[in-house]
Every structure is written in structure tokens, then in C-alpha cells.
Image (tube, rainbow, N blue to C red):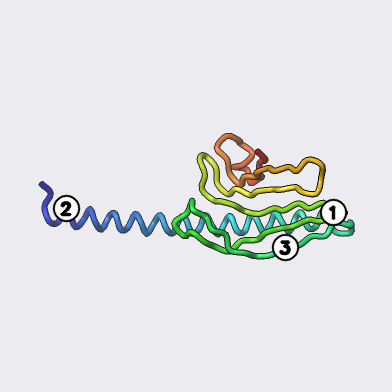
């Protein structure tokens, strides 16, 4: 049977690990917010001077993959001639991936949906700072 001191040490260690995890998670989410903002800024610059309307807004997402559950992040909409592309973050922690961004194309004969990942264990490119489509 564990002594009182061992039990207290175990509980303190558990609390410390939990706090450390929360700090890591908050930092990961901050990086996700920054990377999404940078991506949207880059896409906007590519489309300057075209007929494509770019709209960026900041909304709270509900993310059941994190303990924080809700945080603000950028959303992007591109519209042109009745076609629309919505690009929006949907989750942070996934199986083997981090930072899922959903891309939805509507207004065409065949609507299309893709996912973009900030980090994915199946691709070397993701860890070099590039986004990966799946």
C-alpha cells in the first residue's frame, strides 16, 4: 500500500502533468490559428486583382478534439459567378493529424469537399511547414 507521501506526490505529479498538457494544447491551438491566418492571407494575395471576392471572418469553432472546446479562428469564403468555396477549420487533434481545415466547393455541377491538414504523420511535407490535401 502506498504511503501518504507517495499518494500526495502522485496527485501533485498528475496535476502538474495536466497543467503541462493544457499549456501544450493552448500553444498548439495558437499555432493553428496563426497558420490558418497566414494561409488565408497568402490565398488573398494570390487573388488580388481578380474577379474573385474574398471574405475572411473570425468565428468561434466548437472543437471536441480539445479540452478547450471552443476558440476563435479565421474562416474564408471565395465567391465568383455563382460559385463558392468555403474554407474553414473544423478540428485540431485527429488520428495522426493536427489542424484540419475543411474546403467545400458549391455552385458547380458536382459539389466537392476536401480536407487540408497542417500536420499529418503520413506526409513528410507537413512537418516542413506545408499544408497537405486529403
Spatial separation of the CA atoms under disc 2 and disc 1: 66 Å
Residue beneath the point at 25% across and 58% down: 12
Residue beneath the point at 44% across and 56% down: 67
Q: Which numbered dot is residue 6? A: 2
Q: How many marks?
A: 3
Outermost residue toward the front in this view: 109
Residue 111 at x, y percent in the picture: 75, 43
Task: Rate crowding at label 1 as few (under 14), some (14 to 19) or many (20 or more) other CA atoms within 10 Å.
Answer: few
Residue 56's quadrant in the figure?
A: bottom right
| Quarter of the figure with the C terminus | top right
Spatial separation of the CA atoms under disc 1 and disc 3: 18 Å
- Whether residues under marks 1 and 3 lie with C-beta atoms below 8 angstroms apart, the answer is no
Q: Secondary structure at mark 1?
A: loop
Spatial separation of the CA atoms under disc 3 and disc 2: 53 Å
Residue 39 at x, y percent in the picture: 70, 54
Closer to the camera, 41 or 92? 92
Which of disc 1 and disc 2 is earlier in sequence?
2
Q: Is residue 2 left or right of residue 18?
A: left
Circle 1 residue: 82
Q: Secondary structure at mark 3?
A: strand
- Whether residues under marks 2 and 1 lie with C-beta atoms below 8 angstroms apart, the answer is no
Query: Looking at the image, is mark 1 or mark 3 nearer the viewer?
Result: 1
Circle 3 residue: 56
Residue 40 at x, y percent in the picture: 72, 56
Q: Is residue 26 left or right of residue 109?
A: left
Residue 86 at x, y percent in the picture: 72, 53
Q: Secondary structure at mark 2?
A: helix
Residue beneath the point at 39% across and 57% down: 20
Which of disc 3 and disc 1 is earlier in sequence?
3
Residue beneath the point at 82% across and 54% down: 46
Amino acid at each position: 500500500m502506498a504511503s501518504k507521501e507517495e499518494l500526495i506526490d502522485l496527485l501533485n505529479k498528475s496535476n502538474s502533468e495536466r497543467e503541462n498538457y493544457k499549456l501544450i494544447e493552448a500553444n498548439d491551438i495558437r499555432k493553428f490559428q496563426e497558420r490558418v491566418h497566414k494561409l488565408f492571407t497568402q490565398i488573398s494575395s494570390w487573388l488580388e486583382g481578380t474577379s474573385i471576392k474574398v471574405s475572411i471572418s473570425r468565428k468561434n469553432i466548437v472543437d471536441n478534439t480539445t479540452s478547450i472546446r471552443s476558440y476563435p479562428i479565421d474562416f474564408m469564403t471565395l465567391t465568383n459567378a455563382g460559385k463558392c468555396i468555403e474554407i474553414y477549420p473544423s478540428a485540431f487533434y485527429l488520428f495522426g493529424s493536427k489542424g484540419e481545415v475543411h474546403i467545400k466547393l458549391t455552385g458547380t455541377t458536382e459539389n466537392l469537399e476536401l480536407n487540408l491538414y497542417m500536420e499529418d504523420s503520413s506526409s513528410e511535407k507537413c512537418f516542413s511547414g506545408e499544408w497537405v490535401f486529403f
